[in-house]
Structure formats: C-alpha cells, structure tokens
Image (spheres, grey):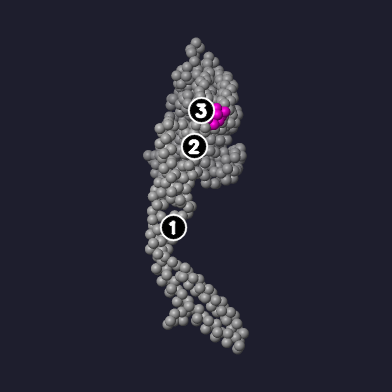
Amino acid sequence: MLSLLHIENIAVIESADISFDQGFNVLTGETGAGKSIVIDAISAILGERAYRDMIRTGTNKASVRAVFTDVPEFPWFADNGVEYDPETVIQREIHLDGKNVCRVNGSLVSVSILHKLGIQLINIHGQHDSASLFDEDNHLTFLDAFGDNEALRAGYAEKYEAVAKLRREIDRMTMDEGEKLRRMETLKYQIAEIEKAELEPGEDEALEDRRKLLQNAEKLSNGMDEAVECLYGGDDTDGAAGLLAQAEYALSRLIRFSDSFQSLHERVSDLKYQVQDVAEEVRDARDELSYSADELEQIESRLDVIHRLRRKYGVTCTDILDYLAKAKKELDEIEFADDHLEQLKKKLKKAEKTAWEAAIALRENRKAAAKAMSARILTELAQLDMPRVQFEVQFRELDLTPNGADAVAFYMSANAGEALKPMSKVASGGELARIMLAMKNVLAEKDQVNTLIFDEVDTGVSGRAAQKVAEKLRSVAAHKQVLCVTHLPQLAALANTHLLIAKSERNGRTFTSVTPLDLEGRKRELARIIGGTNITETTLKSAEEMLRI
C-alpha cells in the first residue's frame, strides 16, 4: 500500500508530507485547493506523463517521493536489476529542461520502466475513465480482463497469425496473366544480365585492390629498389647487411680476449641474418612485381561492368549474387504458381479450421465470463441503489480477426420498462458515476493491485445514492487501500483517515497544505461541506451525527 507521499514544488504545493493508512482514506477541501495536484503527484510516481508546467513558479525542479509497504516481489524487480524490498521507495524529479530522473530503491530507471511497476501498485479511477469504459472499442478488452482468458487468447493469436501469414503469401502469388508475364520477362532479363557477367563472390574487392596496386606500381618498384640498396648496399655504399657482417667479424675476434663479448656477438649475428632475410623478401617482391597498361585497362573495364550491376542489384558482388538467387526462386514460384497456390490453399483451409476452433473456444469462455460479469455488475448496482438496472453483454460474430471472432458491446437500461441500449446513451450523470464505480469494482476483483484511487467519481451523486456509494467504497476498503477525492460528506464521514487540502496566501504567493484531521477537525470539515463557509451549530451537529454512523 501507499504509506507516505512527499511532494516538493509541484504547482502550489511547496512542500508536503502525506501519510496514508490502510482502509478508506479521503481527501477533501475547497474547489481549487489542490486536491488534483496530489493525484498528479501520485501519477508522476507511477510513471505517467509529467509536464514542466507542474513545477512551482520560481523553482528549477519538482520532486515526488513515495514509500510503499508490503510490496509483493514482482518479477519486475529481477527483470530490471532493481533490489527488491517490501518497503519500496520511488523517487522522481521533474526538471525545467524536460529531464526526468526516476529511482526505485536507489536504482535509476526510465519513465517507461517505472510505469510498468506503477500499474502493479496503484489503479487510479477518475471521471475521464467513463469515456474509455463506455467506448465500445474497449469493451472486449474489459471482458477479457474479467474472463482471465490470457492462455486462450495467446493460443488463438498464434493460430490466427498462421492464417494471416498464409493469406499474405497467397495474395502475393495471386496476379493476373498480364502482370505475371511482365514480371517473368523482367526476372528473365535480370537473371540473364547477371549470369552473363559471371561474377565471383568478393571479385570486386580483389579487383579494386589490384587496381590500386597497378596504379602505384612505379612508386612501389622504386621504393623496393631503394630498400634493397639500403639493405644490401650499392656501388658506392655498404648496405646494412654488409656492415653487420663486418661488426659480427670484429666482435668474434674480441671473444678471444673476453667472454663478455659473446652475447653481443650473438645478437649482432641474429640481426645480420634478419636483415638478410628481409632483403631477400623485398628483392623477391620486386622481381615478382609485374604490371602493364593492358592489365589496368582490363581491370577498369571489368569494374565498369560490375559497377553497372551494382547500381541495379546490390552494393557488392555478393549482394548481386544473392539477388540472382532470389530472382531465380521468384521466377520458379511464378512458373509453378498454380501448383504452389493449390498447396497454400490446402494449408490455409486447415489453418482456418484450427483457428476457428480456437476462436469458438475463446467465444464460449467470453460468453461465460459475460454472464458472470453481468451478474456481478447488477449486484453491485443494486447495492448502489440502482436495483432496476438491466445490464447485458451483447455479442456480434465476425470473421477471424487478431482479437478473435467476436465484437462485444455493453448494453443497459437504467429504468424499468425501457429497452436495452448502448450504455453511453442511457445514463445520467449521477447514474454514470455509480455504473462506473460498479464496473471498476468488478474488474478490480481480477487484479492484484492493492491500492485504488477514486478521483471525484462521485460527481453528480447526492442523497441516498451518495450514501450507497460511500458504503460501497468502505466495503472495497475492507480488502484494499482506497484513496478518494470527494466533495460528498457521506463519503468523508465513513473514512478511516481524513486529509484536508487547504490553500492559503503568504507574501503574495499561494501555498497548499495537507493536514490529517482529528475528530474535531473532521466534524468542522464535514460541517463546511454540508453548509458551506457558514458553519452553524446545526451543521456541526449534523456532521457529528454522520461521524457516529
């Protein structure tokens, strides 16, 4: 659960430490006091998008730090090299230059990686959720989440991809006769052009190396002549080999007088033989060097042929030969396309049969899940003072798609005697909040997230319905930590922990504070919610009675 939240320099909050408890936590305050800022700070910790506009005016960065207790050892920790601790600390800094620095238990992580952990720690349900909840494009996703049919969906997806791959292959091979003839002529021309060149793998590189040598042959020859002369000597000079031979002879004579020259004699002798070997190799290379203008012209001509082919078929000779192999294979496929198509169609028929079997199994699972989900939602709605609501998941059969062969839509009737209609078209504002709460509660039963946040989901609810919503949230809080931003006294009265968000002004700057309320503070805050700023003995008494419930 979320036990501590520290906020610095986010909007009008300069610094705040907020402690949350197990059970039902509510946040109340005047409109504009900063309740949504607290939710934004929590969202930042969960890896949601954070904007520079969040940073308090006059500062360079904002930061949020959250402590979660009793955190399960999710695979996320090992997968991302982060040390696991049941008391997990998440920190995030948001800088004016757009940089974000995120840490989990001291380890740096990216925002996207943090988000993958965040969705396992907290679910935030806000007024905007109704848009996604009532969008029929999302209904299949919600049903599958409730049905817990991941294995069936994965099995179907694998079989559908086999069907899709065969269909793509058949489409690729299906062409009219004119197109087929044109493609065959093109391939035959390309194959003949490449084969005529009789290329060898790596031939272009070898020719370019030889051309470079021939273009510099005279310089190579002169350089080797000079090296041989330096090593062997010439008409007017002694070469290195000759001088070393003289030095070796002189040292050999010294050995007779002192053994200390033996080592020097051996080293010079080795040098003499090494120089002689080098001189021989250079002379051999010079003698082997042969070149002619005709050879260079032939190489240039051959490279010109290769260059023309390169422009059409690949960067190197190897690439061109790879293209040749592919062209031959495609030509062969076209020439024998009818036989191949027949084989593919037989495979497709078999693959479609297998995919349909998986799709029907998935459909049966979805229908069973739809029945169970509808019953649970109706039970929830009855507890939320909407006993006459009808709810139904309607199916429409489709051809095979990546998500199965079903389209689903949530239909409902809010009042007795009315026909079922798409859910988004029949609910009023107050009904909308309760329907969303009911559906969210049902879907939340299927996940392991221990903290739920409800951000003003009670909008449009009042009176008896508000009391039912409050009781429902308190019921949920018996099993999960619940944080709720609310304007309703019924919800605030049933909370285990009540936090007041208040705004004040000092030295021309706005500041927001977060204060945990004791019994007397709760009574005054409830009286304010009930009666506005004019707190009377009557509203205080009403608040006290609500707290006794």
CB within 8 Å, label 1 to label 3 = no
The reply, left or right, for residue 514 in relation to residue 369 is: left
Q: CA distance from mark 1 to mark 3?
A: 54 Å
In the picture, which quadrant includes the N terminus?
top right
In front: label 1 or label 3: 1
Closest to the camera, between mark 3 and mark 2, is 2
Q: Which residue is mark 1?
A: 207
Range of the magenta residues? Answer: 342-352
Residue 449 locus on image (x, y percent):
57, 33
Identify which amino acid the numbered label 2 is placed on: Glu
Structural distance between the alpha carbons of marks 3 and 2: 29 Å
* Residue closest to the eye, 354 or 46: 354
Q: Residue at x 40, y 46 (%)?
A: 312
SS assignment at label 2: helix
Residue 333 disc label: 2
Which image quarter holds the C terminus? top right
Q: Percent from the top left, x then y, of residue 202?
A: 47, 54
Q: CA distance from mark 2 to mark 1?
A: 35 Å
Amino acid under disc 3? Thr
**In magenta stretch: residue 470:** no
Residue 401, numbered label: 3
Toward the top, the furthest residue is 417
